[in-house]
Amino acid sequence: GALEAGDPGAAAQAFAHALDLWRGRAFTGLDGCMALRADAAMLDEFRLQVLEHWAAAQLELGNPQELVRRLRSAVGEHPARERLHELLMTGLFRSGDQVGALGVFRDLRTHLAGEFGLEPGEAMRELQRRVLHQELPAAAGADGLPEQKPLPIGEPGRPSPRPLRPCPSAFVG
């Protein structure tokens, strides 16, 4: 894609367009249809990956304020998703808010310990250390975050899109 080709502007624009087309959770209102749950989860995961790639492109472009606004709500909706926290921490730090960036780490750590009895992963701990010591680049460029590849549709070993099964309107048995 455009991000791998070294064009973060085109990538950010494409990701933003895709995100603007999205409206809420996949298949909202059809929660009772068991046949759609796996498809809904896959689409929601894909949307989160697009959001993460958009945020990475914004960091490359030097627009941390733009991603901070959008990622704050995403982190609230997905409090255990470390990649969102990494991007938000980086955006806050690059916006000049070191304390806010460290607060994101603290909130994640509290949530993971309370819900799962876990500590943040190595990448998050390393990012916290770099923010504490102000070793993270303040401007666009290499941010030291692990590369996240988008979920390619139709890649070998990944499910390809398929027509959705209709939900039965009533059960007869």
Image (tube, grey):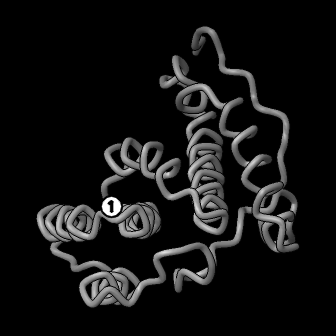
Residue at point 60% right, 25% down? 23
Does 41 sit above or below residue 100?
above
Residue at point 62% right, 34% down? 35
Residue 137, how many percent across, how many down? 48, 82
Amino acid type assigned to the residue bearing label 1 in the image: Ala
Q: Is residue 6 left or right of residue 29?
A: right
Depth check, front residue: 170 or 73: 73
Residue 94, how many percent across, how many down? 43, 68
Tag count: 1
Residue at point 19% right, 62% down? 107
The quarter of the picture where the C terminus appears is top right
Residue 129, how many percent across, how many down? 28, 89
Specify few, some or many for label 1: CA neighbours under 10 Å numbering under 14, 14-19, or 20 or more. Answer: some
- Which corner quadrant of the image does residue 169 belong to? top right
Q: Is residue 39 left or right of residue 117?
A: right
Q: Is residue 46 left or right of residue 152?
A: left
Depth check, front residue: 106 or 97: 97
Q: Dot 1 corresponds to which residue?
A: 80
Q: Tag 1's secondary structure?
A: loop
Does 142 sit above or below residue 21?
below
Depth check, front residue: 47 or 124: 124
Residue 5, how many percent across, how many down? 88, 73
The quarter of the picture where the N terminus appears is bottom right
Q: Is residue 59 left or right of residue 70?
A: right
- Which corner quadrant of the image does residue 9 belong to? bottom right
